Each structure stands twice: as structure tokens, then as C-alpha cells.
Image: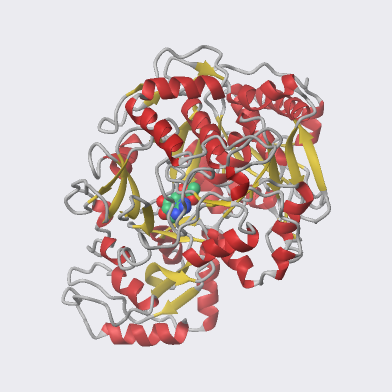
């Protein structure tokens, strides 16, 4: 049996459920060639890759002559303090991968100094604040001074290479400054999304052993105030090892608590520092950051990314997948608390010396034109967002898009979950006006950068397919049960990658064994992505969603076990089972089934309390959309909860439950179907 992850708690491989619509809309689906404005760029430079033949030539080189390919790209895109003489070491079998191991570089030098030296007035960030009409810019010259001053502050705290710093900040340029200041000194940052609760933050701060937290007084999103510092204060009650909290003043609310000497105001601290700090060269394999992500079990994993390979992956993918040229204005709407924000708001754009938009607000504030107004105002050339936002905005109608001038756009991207073909088509036709290439980019926190993606000037797109592997990524589809590689086209199974690539995660902080068990041991010799996939008769890849107990709500990864553990913390709860329910806007939503301890009465007040418990323990992103109090959960005779049945029932497929003989009490199914139909 290759993968315990495939046979989760209920003993059923979930791959069968994901192949139901595999064959219908794949090979025969509509195709979209690269748009005219990329093929004939009229006065602009040609796309970096402008035909499938060019893509294939580069791809084949990356696989057949990896040393040549990676030496060239790593020297073209990065500046090394000490050149590497060797491209890679190690294997997926051993889990000991290393890239450019004897090379040294500094990530902040690569992202900031190189461009500030060339032209300090070049714009690094356009900051679109929450309140519309408040955009400001940060030039590379200003960024260098800010990063250096802050690095000197961090040094004055006694931090040294290898120490970790937690960053819990709103979407403001200072969040990127904080990341780059860490990188300048070889400190390892761990950004925690500012929507996570105090206890989630505390868990991450403690796991990463951070002694310093960088935060802000408050955040603003869609005119709502988020009391960020108050959440940090709450979290730190259980993190006595934190010595310093550096607080950026975002709103200036005077009532924010401040505990000197632990708390230090950012503006006061940087004012006392010299705005230059020499970059510390680090090994390409020194860690750049940890980023926590949800796995199949409750405890989040601190995925470790290194300096050289990660930066190369972010820069190379951004250059080719979004076809970045001089003068482009790139906008990725992801929060820096997620990997997409790391790679495509901060590291990728800056490593290319490009201009990146930092968007603090939400897509519907003040109305559903916000994104499109943003494109118009800043003449954005490449725009990158998530299917959940695309679906939500589409519901508001085309007028919100059509009233804005989107003619600057060339490439529009999607990330985070599978995009349904009709949302893809709307994005292409209404937002892209039929003039833009759509890139549906598949990747993960662990992959660091895109692994399956179209190239805008080359790929014949099929809506809903992430198309083909990026350079250096050798894909395989495996039989989930035997682990055998399924050769040829028209196959479905689990997605795996056959060889290491530079931006892949190297380990899980403090738990290399878990790294091996999660990604490398399930199918020895392969990286196991945790997603189901198929390859159609034309060789296109279609991602079918997770095959483990991870659910994807509005592009955010959550583990069902994590939500279950939060529910069980409430004194009235006996047991809980959480599944993802299909949701038109967010892709999936959280549906929780709960049984109560004796003596507790099922009522709406209690339900509200349980929902609150989850929000407090994990954060608002984990709010169950549906919470159903039941007398009993479906279980096997040996007492294991069968989540497969719950998944089917909430998907309205109660008539396709398959074999129920393992159920200890089959009569429970009708009760569940009835309860779900009244609740949803
Ligand atoms: C970048 C990011 C990773 C999981 C991944 C998969 C899903 C991401 C996708 C996609 C289909 C795409 N996913 N992009 N599924 N098509 N284009 O989202 O990282 O938060 O770690 O999530 O998201 O299930 O395994 P992360």
C-alpha cells in the first residue's frame, strides 16, 4: 500500500470521486491560441517564448541537459557573491536535495540593490491602500533605504543569521520591507496571514522559535478595522520567548496597547538607524523562509524554502509565465501571508526589477469594479488572482468590468484551485476582452513556484487545464493504489513529480521525518503533490483537486482535522467530522457535523458558539458555512468516521453512496440526507 494519505481515516481512496468528469471536457474542449497582441506585439518586444516549438526546445533542454539549463538561467537571473560550481545534489529517493550548494548570494541584494544601483527612481511597489484613490509608490532607491534601516533595527535586537522572525502584518509595502530586511541579514522569516487567530499565530511563533514579531497597530480591509496588535498581544501570552515586538503604525489609533520595553515603534526604531546595511552573503541552501501550511493532520507544517533555488524559481516562472518585460506593471492580488504573495508580490517581481502592485483592499470595496479600476489607474499589464474572486466578481455582472479601460492588460492569471471552464471563459472574454492570454497556474506552497502552466505566447489553452509542465518539472501520473506510473495519454491518477527542481521545499521545520512521510515516501522516487490529475489525449494536464483531507476554501488550504480539533475544544462537543461542500463562489465551503455530549441541547445559540470556537481557534477563514448537529456520525464497525459518506451527502449525491456494508448502522444515511437537505 503506497500512501496512507490516500486512505484517510475512513479507509477509502478518494481518487475515484475525482475522475467522474475527467473524460468529458478534456481533449474535446475548446482551445484558445495565444492572442494576437502577444503573437504580433506591434512595437513591443516579442514574448520570451512565442511558439510551442520554442517551449519544447527549452523544456527538453531543461530535462536532458539540466546542468546547462540551470547554470545559464541561474547566472542570467541572479547575481552571486560566490559563483556555484555545481548545480544540484541529492535525489527524491533520499530527500537530500540541494541546489547550487557551493554558491553564495544575498536575496535582498538581488531584489533591491541591483535595481537601486542602476536607477534609484525605478518604481518597485505601487501601493493601493484600502481607501480608493490613495495610491503611493516606493522606488527601488527608497526601498533600499527602508530595507537597510530595518535590517539595522533587527540587528540591534541581537538577531543573527539563521534566527527566525515572525511577520504578522496587513498588505502594505512594509510587510515586504520586513521580509527583505530579514533576507538581508540571513534571518529566516515566517509570515503568518493576518487573518489567523491569536492561537494560530501563537502556535506558529512557538513552532518557528521566533524571538521577534513584526506587526502593525491595525489593518484596514474594505474599510473594516482589524485589530492586529491586539491579536499579537493575545498570542504572545503563550509565547514567553518573544523578546521584541516591532509595531508599524498603519492607522495611528491611540488606544492600541503598547508594552515597553518589549514593544518598539517601527518609525522610532528606523529613525535611529543608518539607511545602509551591507547584505550578508548566505549559502544558496540557507533557508530564506518558513511558511506554515495545512496538511492532512491537524498541526500545520512549517515548509522550508531556501535562498538560491527558491529565488530562481520565482524569477524564472514570473518572467516566462507572465512574460514580464521592462516597464511592465505586474499585479498579484494574493496576500503576502500565502506563498503566492511571497513568490509573486515580493520575490519574483523584485528579482526581475519589475514593478509590483501591493493591494491592501478587497475586490468588492467600494464596489465590484475595484480590481478593474486598479488595472485602469495603474495601467497594469499582467494581473493574477484566484478563481474564487473571478467567480464572485462575475456574479456582479459585466458592467463593473466594462466601464473600466483594461486595454493595458496582456496576460491574466489564475491560481489556488481548479478554475471552472465557464469562469475561465468569462475571465478571458470579459476581463481579457479576448486580447489577453489566460494562464491557469498550478503549484503549491511546497513547490515554491509554478509547476504546471501555460506560456502566454506559446500555449494553445484549454479552459480548465493548467496545460503543460514548466521547465525542469518532469511530471508523472501514478496509479494511486499500486504506485505504478501510468504511461501515455488518457490516464487519471495522482500527480507526482519525478525529479527535484530548484524551488522545491527542502524540509519541514524541525521535522524532516514528516517531510519525507508526507511528500517523498508515499511513492518512493517521486514527489507526491496530494492532488489527483489526469492527462488527456492531447497530453494536457487537468488537476482534479486534493486526494487527502485538505480542503480548499476560496483558495485557502485548510485541513479538515484542524477544524475538527477546534470544534472538539468546545465543552459541549462529543465528536465532529468536517468535509468540504461544493460552493459556487469559494470552490469549497466548510461543512461540519457535530455530535453533542449528553446533557447538551441542540439549539442555534450553541451552533453560533461552535462556529465562534473555530473562528477564535483558527481564524475567520475557517468559519464553517454549515454546521449540522446530528445524533450520530456514520462510522465503520471498528468506529472510524466515514467522511466519504458525508462528502457525498453534502454534494447532493446521496443516491451514489456505493457500498455501505462497512457502516455499523446503515439506517443513519437517510437521517443524514434529511438533515443535510434542511440545513443546506
Ligand atoms: C499556490 C497555492 C496548493 C493546492 C494544490 C491544489 C490547489 C493551486 C491550482 C490548484 C488546480 C490550479 N491549486 N493552484 N488546483 N489548479 N491552478 O495555491 O498554494 O496554498 O499551498 O495550495 O491548491 O490542490 O495542491 P497552496
Residues 45 and 116: in front is: 45
Q: Position of residue 96 (x, y in %)?
A: 32, 27
Residues 640 and 418: in front is: 418
Residue at x-position 39% and y-position 75%: 651
Does 241 appear above or below 607? above
Query: Based on the displayed image, in which of its 4 quarters is residue 678 positioned?
Result: bottom left
Whether residue 411 is visible here, answered yes or no, is: no
Query: Based on the displayed image, in which of its 4 quarters is residue 500 positioned?
Result: top left
Query: Based on the displayed image, in which of its 4 quarters is residue 670 positioned?
Result: bottom left
Residue at x-position 68% and y-position 48%: 170
Residue at x-position 22% and y-position 63%: 11
Residues 455 and 575: in front is: 455
Whether residue 205 is visible here, answered yes or no, is: yes
Q: Position of residue 368 (x, y in %)?
A: 70, 66
Residue at x-position 20% and y-position 48%: 483
Q: Position of residue 455 (x, y in %)?
A: 50, 43
Applied colour scheme: secondary structure
Does 66 appear above or below 102? below
Amino acid at each position: 500500500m503506497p500512501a496512507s494519505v490516500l486512505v484517510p481515516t475512513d479507509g477509502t481512496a478518494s481518487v475515484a470521486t475525482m475522475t467522474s468528469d475527467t473524460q468529458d471536457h478534456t481533449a474535446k474542449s475548446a482551445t484558445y491560441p495565444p492572442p494576437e497582441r502577444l503573437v504580433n506585439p506591434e512595437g513591443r518586444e516579442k514574448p520570451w517564448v512565442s511558439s510551442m516549438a520554442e517551449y519544447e526546445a527549452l523544456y527538453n533542454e531543461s530535462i536532458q541537459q539540466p546542468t546547462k539549463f540551470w547554470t545559464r538561467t541561474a547566472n542570467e537571473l541572479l547575481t552571486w557573491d560566490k559563483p556555484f560550481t555545481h548545480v544540484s545534489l541529492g535525489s527524491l529517493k533520499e530527500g537530500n536535495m540541494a541546489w547550487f550548494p557551493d554558491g553564495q548570494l544575498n536575496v535582498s541584494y538581488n531584489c533591491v540593490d541591483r535595481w537601486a544601483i542602476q536607477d534609484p527612481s525605478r518604481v518597485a511597489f505601487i501601493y493601493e491602500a484600502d481607501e480608493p484613490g490613495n495610491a503611493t509608490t516606493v522606488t527601488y532607491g527608497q526601498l533600499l533605504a527602508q530595507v537597510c534601516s530595518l535590517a539595522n533595527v533587527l540587528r540591534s535586537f541581537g538577531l543573527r543569521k539563521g534566527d527566525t522572525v515572525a511577520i504578522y502584518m496587513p498588505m502594505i509595502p512594509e510587510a515586504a520591507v520586513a521580509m527583505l530586511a530579514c533576507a538581508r541579514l540571513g534571518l529566516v522569516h515566517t509570515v503568518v496571514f493576518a487573518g489567523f487567530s491569536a492561537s494560530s499565530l501563537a502556535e506558529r511563533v512557538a513552532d518557528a522559535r521566533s524571538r521577534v514579531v513584526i506587526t502593525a497597530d491595525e489593518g484596514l480591509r474594505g474599510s473594516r478595522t482589524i485589530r492586529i496588535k491586539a491579536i499579537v498581544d493575545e498570542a504572545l501570552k503563550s509565547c514567553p520567548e518573544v523578546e521584541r515586538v516591532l509595531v508599524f503604525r498603519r492607522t495611528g489609533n491611540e488606544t492600541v496597547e503598547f508594552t515597553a520595553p518589549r514593544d518598539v515603534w517601527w518609525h522610532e526604531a528606523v529613525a535611529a538607524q543608518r539607511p545602509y546595511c551591507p547584505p550578508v552573503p548566505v549559502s544558496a541552501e540557507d533557508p530564506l523562509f518558513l511558511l506554515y501550511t495545512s496538511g492532512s493532520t491537524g498541526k500545520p507544517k512549517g515548509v522550508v524554502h531556501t535562498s538560491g533555488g527558491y529565488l530562481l524559481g520565482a524569477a524564472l516562472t514570473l518572467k516566462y509565465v507572465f512574460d514580464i518585460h521592462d516597464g511592465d506593471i505586474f499585479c498579484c492580488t494574493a496576500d503576502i501571508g500565502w506563498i503566492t504573495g511571497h513568490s509573486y508580490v515580493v520575490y519574483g517581481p523584485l528579482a526581475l526589477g519589475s514593478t509590483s502592485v501591493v493591494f491592501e483592499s478587497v475586490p468588492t470595496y467600494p464596489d465590484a469594479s475595484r480590481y478593474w479600476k486598479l488595472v485602469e489607474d495603474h495601467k497594469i499589464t499582467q494581473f493574477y488572482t484566484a478563481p474564487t474572486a473571478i467567480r464572485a466578481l462575475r456574479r456582479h455582472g459585466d458592467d463593473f468590468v466594462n466601464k473600466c479601460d483594461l486595454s493595458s492588460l496582456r496576460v491574466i492569471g489564475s491560481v489556488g484551485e481548479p478554475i471552472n471552464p465557464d469562469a475561465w471563459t468569462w475571465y478571458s472574454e470579459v476581463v481579457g476582452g479576448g486580447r489577453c492570454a489566460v494562464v491557469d497556474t498550478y503549484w503549491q506552497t511546497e513547490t515554491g513556484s509554478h509547476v504546471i502552466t501555460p506560456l502566454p505566447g506559446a500555449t494553445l489553452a484549454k479552459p480548465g487545464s493548467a496545460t503543460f509542465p514548466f521547465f525542469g518539472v518532469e511530471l508523472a501520473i501514478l496509479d494511486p493504489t499500486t504506485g505504478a506510473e501510468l504511461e501515455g495519454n488518457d490516464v487519471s491518477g495522482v500527480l507526482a513529480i519525478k525529479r527535484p527542481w530548484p524551488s522545491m521545499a527542502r524540509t519541514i521545520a524541525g521535522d524532516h521525518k514528516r517531510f519525507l512521510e508526507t511528500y517523498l515516501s508515499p511513492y518512493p522516487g517521486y514527489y507526491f503533490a496530494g492532488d489527483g490529475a489526469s492527462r488527456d489525449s492531447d497530453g494536457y494536464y487537468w488537476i482534479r483537486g486534493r486526494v487527502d483531507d485538505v480542503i480548499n476554501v476560496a483558495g485557502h488550504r485548510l485541513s479538515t482535522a484542524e477544524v475538527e480539533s477546534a470544534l472538539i475544544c468546545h465543552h459541549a462537543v462529543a465528536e465532529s467530522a468536517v468535509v468540504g461542500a461544493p460552493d459556487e463562489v469559494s470552490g469549497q465551503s466548510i461543512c461540519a457535523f457535530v455530535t453533542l455530549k449528553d446533557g447538551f441541547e441542540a439549539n442555534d445559540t450553541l451552533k453560533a458558539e461552535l462556529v465562534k470556537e473555530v473562528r477564535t481557534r483558527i481564524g475567520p477563514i475557517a468559519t464553517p458555512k454549515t454546521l449540522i448537529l446530528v445524533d450520530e456520525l456514520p462510522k465503520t464497525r471498528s468506529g472510524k468516521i466515514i467522511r466519504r459518506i458525508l462528502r457525498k451527502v453534502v454534494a447532493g449525491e446521496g443516491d451514489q453512496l456505493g457500498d455501505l456494508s462497512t457502516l455499523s448502522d446503515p439506517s443513519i444515511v437517510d437521517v443524514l440526507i434529511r438533515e443535510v437537505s434542511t440545513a443546506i
